[in-house]
Amino acid sequence: MNNNYIQQHNDTGKVFDHILRSGYPLRMLIYNGDVDQACNFLGDQWFVEAVAARWNMSVSKDFNSWWYRTQIAGYVKQFTYGPASIDLLTVKDYSKELPFNYQLHPLKEDYQIQETVTAERTGMPVPGSVSTRKLKLKSRKMRKNKSTALRERFASAPLDPPPIGTKQDDLVTDLPGLTWKPNFNHYSGYLAASPGNYLHYWLTESQGSPKDDPLILWLNGGPGCSSLGGLFEELGPFHINSDGTTLFENVFSWNKVGNVLFMEAPRDVGFSYRASNVSDSKYNDDYTASDNVLALASFFTKFPEYKNRTFFITGESYGGVYVPTLTSALIKKIQSKGSDSMSYVNLAGVAIGNGEMSEIQQINSAVSLLYFRGEHGKSDYDALSKCCNTTSPQAYCDFTSYITLDVAGNAWPKVNDNSIAGQCGNLVVQQGFNDVWGTANDVYNTFQDCYSTAPDGTRSRRKRSVDMPPLMNSKPFVDQAKTINYQSTDANGGFACFNGDATEAYLNLATVRKAIHIPENFTHWSDCNDNMNANYIQQHNDTSSVFVDILNSGYPLRFLIYNGDVDMACQFLGDEWFIEKLAADNGMTSNTRAPWNYTQGSIFRATIKANRDPRVIYNTSDHL
């Protein structure tokens, strides 16, 4: 039948014209899941906007978020013409092949449109909502959280330099909370950086062949966030249960294939610290890189068996700055002929996941990406046309020419008046920066409602109202308990939101601290140090010059730039534009963009190889 069906209306504009012309009091709801490509939301948006413009329909409700049980469920705009109305609505993370669990009854308007102007437009909190994830560090103007208050309360306790023990001294022999017997050795202790600064490390040896497998350094971002977050919440062999005291095995741990070194940097992050006999308040990118090089030299002294071993530097998020600056500084040491040469380091490659290698390109691309994810309306996006010397804002446009970035990485208009430059500056700051970091959406996964695991074993939600029941998955299966992922709205059993509370509880247990050789009077461990973040000077809002230094060194190095495609904090489009520009500016050749597969023929997006620098996009993965 499909083959013989005559499609008479490839555009139903005339049909809608007839309905509106009839004067019939009809309410119409046009709704779209925002991840469907077969009949995508943007095409329907453009169609409805064109009908509304043709009939000069009134906008009775401006483009805004709508909510389901205190969660942003999508975005809606309403048009009216006489007695008729059209509601244009998106549903977050929904496609036509998925069950529709939202109770959306258009004739009763039960989709809870937020009648008041929401936080995205005013900066005022939405009732019942809180920050989605503790790791959302982006502004100097941060509230003190519990971890920061505890750190400050204990900060007066002086800390002497730690003993830089031997490898055997740092061996962890009895880690509390283990529910299985690890088949590898692991070590925790301190490495010496610049005078008075000591960086904490945790080395998990390979489960394969530790004497032959490569050494992999891992750095989390922030700036100011601990790499133990990476160990316990992402790629390490230990993951923490919801009780905050016991551990379960991460079967996808990176130490299945390598010896993974987690280093907490810079000092004052995690268990790293500045000794009481030193006055040092400087935090910036170059100083961090220098301290990391010194700490690595200390590591190779403690573990000489890793000299000349294949070595990789990896990291995520603000690691997009940490990793290349460390790489550049380390190459200089490797190539040095002086007494401080580190020619024994066999640096073979670098990997950066969802990295902020260029905040300039991150903001520039976020303007478009948020629109194409349905978080901005057409009128918002069209307003940018005056800011571009192009036929439409869909062509590449350097929006960042209207803004400036401060030393904390915050965006501000260059001109703050009613001129075109001033208007464009404010539009770009709002759409490319504030709407990334200042909404109730999960900045690390646009399409997920984030749950967290409380350390006492109870389930808490980041965005829960005290007078509303928690959102539950509803599935038509008999044994629902086995299929529900209680940690998030991800029904496919993917990685739950960061277990920051459980990690914090575990690493502050006295028994754990003793087992991993932390000084008894050390301050409260927290995933991120807000105070350090607030005082950190970001010197590289674009790391192009650092990459050029690496390329010009002639050092044979392989780069992997990989991104989860649902992250907004350090999203794939900004990294793609950064790499494409870097390749073009430096005469690099590239392969054709093509999909790469994991299993069962599943496409995991694309890879582009430019000389030695491949970049990969992971399908439906978040902040990596």
Image (cartoon, rainbow, N blue to C red):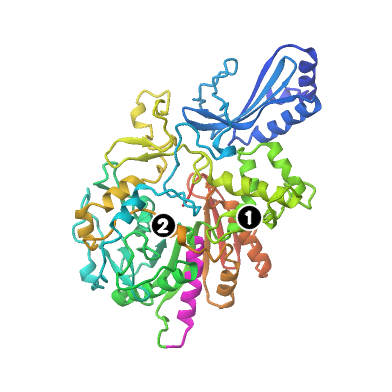
> Which is more N-terminal, label 1 or label 2?
2
Could you tell me residue 31's position as x and y percent? 62, 26
Which quadrant of the structure image shows residue 79? top right
Q: Is residue 455 visible?
A: yes
Residue at 38%, 55% (x, y): give it. 230
Q: Residue 613: which disc?
A: none
Is 2 in front, or is 550?
A: 550
Side (left or right) of 538 relative to 15: left
Is 39 in front, or is 442?
A: 442
Is 331 one of the magenta-colored residues?
Answer: yes
Task: Specify the amino acid type for callout 2.
Answer: Asn
- Residue corresponding to mark 2: 531
Up the image or down, 127 lies above or below 406; here it is: above
- Residue corresponding to mark 1: 593
Tell me the SS state at disc 1. Answer: loop
Task: Specify the amino acid type for callout 1.
Answer: Arg
Up the image or down, 14 lies above or below 566; here it is: above
Could you tell me residue 340's position as x and y percent? 40, 84
Residue at 37%, 34% (x, y): give it. 486
In the current view of this chain or complex, which residue is farthest to the bottom?
Answer: 338
Q: Give the alpha-carbon distance from disc 2 to disc 1, as whole Å.
A: 42 Å
Could you tell me residue 262's position as x and y percent? 36, 62
